[in-house]
Image (cartoon, coloured by chain):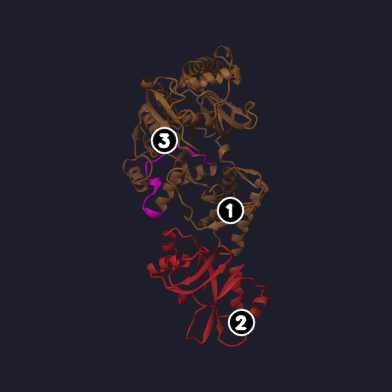
Amino acid sequence: MFNPEFESMPVPKLKELQLERLQWSVRHAYENNAVYKRKFDAAGFHPDQLKSLDDLRRVPFLTKHEMREASPFGLFATPMREVVRVHSSSGTTGNATVVGYTKQDLDVWATLIARCLAATGATEEDIVQVAYGYGLFTGGLGLHYGVEKLGATVVPISGGNTDRQLMLIRDYGSSMLACTPSYAINMIDFAAKQMPDFDFRKTKLRRGIFGAEPWTEAMRKEIETKMGIDAYDIYGLSEVMGPGVSNECSAKQGLHVFEDHFLVEIIDPETGEVLPEGSQGEIVYTSLTKEACPVIRYRSRDITRIYRDACSCGRTHIKMDKVTGRSDDMLIIRGVNVFPSQIEAILMEIEGVEPHYQIVVDRKGTMDDIEVMVEVEEAIFSDELKVMNALRDRITNRFRSVLGISAKVTLAEPSSIARSQGKAQRVIDKRKQ
Amino acid sequence: MKITQLSVFLENKPGRLQQILSVLAGASINIQTLTIAEVTDFGILRLIVDRPDDAYQALKAQHITCSRTEVLGVVLDDSPGALYTLMEAFSKRQLNIEYMYAYANPGQASSIMIFRFEDLEKAQAALLEEGIQLVPRSEIHDV
């Protein structure tokens, strides 16, 4: 553990610390930022009313829309002379939002990333290849300074140049890889196709920390088997800080949220009502220590569950499930709500189907039309048509029974669906074009 | 006695067959016969070639989905009723055919048909007992 006194703090003490920090954070936002002051005043809330953690429910939510409206610097709560860096969200859904960091914010961030790395077993002996994009995106620089904070060696290669990535893994003996899970799979495919002599198992690669997009257990299994490593999930969002808001530990069973810096709630995305621990819903973040860009009750749109258990790693911080979907990603097809992650999960459970698929939604006349293209790898290929047809029928039937809609399933040749080096484009919605 | 057939997954799109054939040509593979089984949007290309293992490796290297399947080659007189007589033997032995196609055997007195059976071992034993001539592997594949 990188910060054992905080990471394994007894829960009652942790809650005291949270309340103390929450009172500071809410007051800081109110007194130093006009947007927060206006919002709190309009809701009839004053920081003096915050006597317990539950009182947070009286504070209005901050939405993604409000963050965009305030862009670029409208939610900063420190003078620009104290802001030493800005980052921007990837803008996956709509315009980018800009976030700022003071020196202390950057130090906290690096510390939290160092905790994440240490939670996967990394030490200062490790050589960490950071293959997240460097730049406005928080992935690259976020991981970079965390590796340095831990005292390990950072290889700042950034994203892309897959052949070079593999050469450095081999030649530098990188022991750890940090990138998006889809890029890790891209590396596996590239090696299989273009560098037949390259064998991940003969390299020193032992662990990977993957995030910035939702991924499934089946993807973890594929990465672990084919790279011969342990793969861990790192989660974050630039609006709240960047990667390192929560992270998996050695148990690989849920992600610990760093509760000494963030307070999390789960709400019903429709009503905004706070749900009890253990319920599935939208996760809402409140920063407890951020100076430049405090977020108070930020609605992430990420769907997950939070719960506290006695974790084998010894950390006391609350856990969240792997994020299964973003309420923004939700597709409404013939009036039915469908998350791409549900489609992915169905494909995963049908044995042997590799996680390469694309969802195409179109409107034919007044009817929504959904097509799912699935790449056929040798593991599921049969030379008998009836077997292939049965596979397609099985996928089609699972979609119908689980999602309640009928989708056209198309079997495609390997590599016929475009791979991206960053985030995978799983959905093409032609209705919006 | 068994012959190795290559099966390739193919999307039903212009240029797909050409690409497969170009990979095989590049590996100097000679195709003795081929057939395509198709549904609306994809098909399965089945090939008998001189060097099936080399062909398989060449296709795999290009990330093309393919597999190797064992089939039987049956020798038939090039005369009316020959296939009918053969089917009589199949029926008598309760052999179920998955699929079949003709093998190019130009300039020869007899024809060859390729058969894939539900139970290949049983089929082979039954046909040999019936005195039906099977094509030896060495006649089709380079050893």
**Residue B2 among those drawn in magenta:** no
**Coordinates of residue A144 in the picture (x, y in percent):** 37, 32
- Please report the residue visible at 37 percent of the width from the left and 41 percent of the height from the top: A204
Chain part drawn in magenta? A193-215
Q: Label 2 is placed on what type of residue?
A: Leu
Do the residues under discs 3 and 2 have CB atoms within 8 angstroms? no
Task: Give the Cα distance between marks 1 and 3.
Answer: 32 Å
- Helix, strand or loop for disc 1: strand
Given the image, what chain letter belongs to the residue carrying mark 3?
A
Q: Which residue is mark 2?
A: B83
Residue A187: x, y in percent? 41, 47
Q: Is residue A248 visible?
A: no
Which residue is at the front of the view, B7 or A363? A363
Q: Check the image and report above or below for A356 versus A181.
A: below
Q: Which chain is brown?
A: A
Left or right: A158 as drawn, with respect to A37: left
User: Is residue A368 visible in this depiction of the protein?
Assistant: yes
Chain identifier, colour red: B
Image mark for residue A371: 1
* Residue A201 highlighted magenta (yes or no): yes
Which three-letter amino acid code belongs to the residue tagged 3?
Answer: Phe
Check the image and report above or below for A203 versus A381.
Answer: above
| Contact? badges 2 and 1 (CB < 8 Å) | no
Residue topped by disc 3: A137
